[in-house]
Image (cartoon, rainbow, N blue to C red):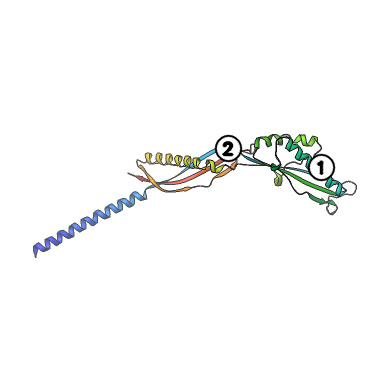
Amino acid sequence: MKATNIIAAAAIAVGLLALGLCIRSGLKAFTDNSRSVDVRGLAEREVPANHVTWPIVFKLTGNDLPSVYSQVNSTNSTVVKFLKENGLTENEISVGAPKMEDNIDNYNYKPGITSRYAITSIVTVSSDQVEKVRGLILRQGDLLSMGIPVQAQDYGNSISYEFTGLNDIKPEMIAEATKNAREAAKKFSDDSGSDLGKIKSARQGQFSIEDRDAYTPYIKTVRVVTSLTYYLED
């Protein structure tokens, strides 16, 4: 009986020791896995716009509607001719439907002073030749000298510049943002006396494309921020 009890006690002791080691190992693994650092990496670059939309707006007035409409058509042809002679193609130019206002139903109308009819027309340039179009925009005075009453840009008819080549630079920018995030994590781990482990989780932020500033809308700033979590190891 004594031998049997000794063997049983020894088996229990060994079992408890093994259980204790397993618990210790599990707790250590849990602790290691719970130690991490969250970092963000920024990638940013300036790119030139590769598409421009330029609405050329003018308004003609008069008291004889057919006559005003005829003037509008003639002016549209003059504007289109000017654009083509300066390097733009048919596919880059579109003429919108004219918009007519009858001022007799409008409080602005004063017989003998204000014209009854006002017709607004828009000739729109949509082109990838950004620099060429920018040069023509600076030459709007040429249209004025031809007697075309080009109106100032407003909120609804403003010149817009776009950058459409995001897919071409996206992989490089993501790699750059990830590299910057890792460098930040490495600095943190070094300062804390830890080793930088594997990535625990990663999230790519949204790309943003904005004007560099209010004065150069034809230069864009592309930006992306990635968020990563790294394990820290002893």
**Left or right of 162 in this view: 188:** left
Q: Nearer the viewer, residue 97 or 231?
A: 97
Where's the N terminus, which quadrant? bottom left
Q: Earlier in the sequence, mark 2 or mark 1?
A: 2
CA gap, disc 2 and disc 1: 39 Å
Q: Position of residue 193 (x, y in %)?
A: 35, 40
Q: Nearer the viewer, residue 32 or 211?
A: 211
Q: In this rendering, does residue 198 appear at all?
A: yes
Q: Position of residue 181 (x, y in %)?
A: 45, 42
Mark 1 is surrounded, within 10 Å at the Cα level, by few (under 14), some (14 to 19) or many (20 or more) other residues, namely few
Say which amino acid is labelled 1.
Answer: Ser
Residue at the bottom extreme, as displayed: 1
Residue at horizontal 31 percent and vertical 51 percent from the top = 29
- Asked which secondary structure carries label 1, the reply is helix
Q: Mark 2 or mark 1, which is nearer to you?
A: 1
Q: Nearer the viewer, residue 1 or 50?
A: 50
- Badges 2 and 1: C-beta atoms under 8 Å apart? no
Where's the C terminus, which quadrant? top left
- Asked which secondary structure carries label 2, the reply is strand
Say which amino acid is labelled 2.
Answer: Val
Q: Is residue 212 above or below residue 17?
A: above
* Image quadrant in which you'd find residue 149: top right
Mark 2 is surrounded, within 10 Å at the Cα level, by few (under 14), some (14 to 19) or many (20 or more) other residues, namely some
* Image quadrant in which you'd find residue 217: top right
Residue ID for mark 1: 74
Residue ID for mark 2: 47
Q: Indicate which disc residue 23 carries.
A: none
Residue at horizontal 54 percent and vertical 38 percent from the top = 45
Q: Position of residue 73 (x, y in %)?
A: 80, 44
Q: Position of residue 85 (x, y in %)?
A: 74, 35
